[in-house]
Amino acid sequence: PLVNPLRSLILAAAGNDALRRLVATTPVSRDVVRRFVAGETTADAVAVARDLVDSGLTVTLDHLGEDTTDKALAESSVRAYLDVLDRLREEGLASRVEVSVKLSAVGQVLDERLGLDNAARICAAAEQAGTTVTLDMEDHTTTDSTLRVLAELRRTWPSTGGVLQSYLHRTRADAQALAGAGSRVRLCKGAYAEPESVAFPTMHEVDRSYVQCANDLLAGEGYPMFATHDPRLIEIVSEQARLHERAPGSYEFQMLHGVRPDEQLRLSAAGETVRVYLPYGQEWYGYLMRRLAERPANTALFLRALTSR
Ligand code: FAD
């Protein structure tokens, strides 16, 4: 099952302010945070992105923040993206580094139109910088809205990417609809706690759906982006890509910063395009808690760092 007690406990801690302060002020735990998050500033993000690019990887930068119900906060999130896109252009990194945007961070929660307008400003800046935008996918109550916004953005910026989550029943149909020429689609399993009415309850079904959707995307004419750390899925997708006579570079693999870094380099050395999802910004706490909830081994690492001197 997707939900386990440890996961629920950690996700509950995600809302705990005292824990947040402890994590922020303990030096060793800051190192653990740094494993998953580039840092708090634009300069941190650009510096880590440059290191990754120098090692042969590509990057998608995520300015942390979500579920913004405040117009001023949404505006500051947009400005953070405009700022980092400027820097990417100045530093000559735009051909290897794109940005990922959560619509809920730029106003979607307040009003879909505001989310669209703000995302459009980011897409325009990305185009000027010479790079692209991918809209992250959030919980299932936002899927229709996010796909609508994606379709609207693609009318002006056809290379704007979308994300599909294989844990949702609806996703097979979405994958077929989005497999056309020019589309960029990230396929992931899905990271939110979803009810059985909309999502597959077992990992087995989620994985099977992933394989089916991957096949649909590879059979189509778009550019699929396979976001997973799962060794079995990476192997199956690689084999599917060969069967569909997809050359490396006509699709890519994506992994999170700090997760399976050796595998990222191995795939890249084998000629695959590998993109690292690199979050930065002050709102790192909730993101970190989700990564810990996904994997008990990460939590053990984290707790050891917190308690050792
Ligand atoms: P899991 O089922 O978590 O793990 C499968 C196997 O992978 C494990 O058994 C293990 O063998 C291996 N593995 C996993 N983690 C590790 C590790 N730390 N060390 C060693 N081996 C490991 N979710 C969304 O809902 N919306 C998004 O927009 C979104 N964007 C994403 C972008 C990227 C680039 C990535 C990588 C993920 C994104 N996700 C997103 C999260 C995603 O949905 C999953 O929650 C997350 O990737 C975990 O699933 P998994 O496919 O890696 O496999």
Image (cartoon, rainbow, N blue to C red):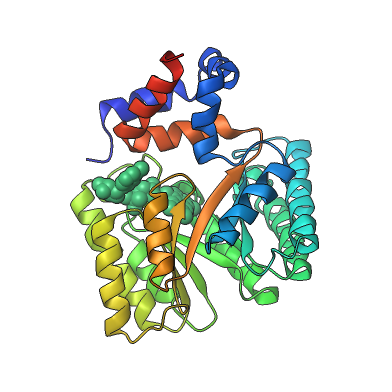
Where residue 301 sits: x, y (%)? 37, 28
Quadrant where the N terminus lies?
A: top left
Q: Is residue 256 toward the left or the right of residue 182 in the image?
A: left
Task: Find residue 308 and report its image quarter.
Answer: top left
Front position in the image: 238 or 309: 309
Task: Find residue 267 and report its image quarter.
Answer: bottom left
* Residue at horizontal 32 percent and vertical 36 percent from the top: 295
* Residue at horizontal 50 percent and vertical 23 percent from the top: 29
Residue 188 appears in the rendering: no
Front position in the image: 267 or 152: 267
Residue 308 appears in the rendering: yes
Q: Residue furthest bottom?
A: 245
* Residue at horizontal 62 percent and vertical 66 percent from the top: 96
Q: How many marks?
A: 0
Where residue 154 sits: x, y (%)? 63, 72
Front position in the image: 122 or 243: 243
* Residue at horizontal 56 percent and vertical 66 percent from the top: 161
Where residue 194 sits: x, y (%)? 35, 42
Q: Is residue 245 above or below residue 56?
A: below
Q: Is residue 162 toward the left or the right of residue 94 in the image?
A: left
Q: Is residue 193 above or below residue 154?
A: above
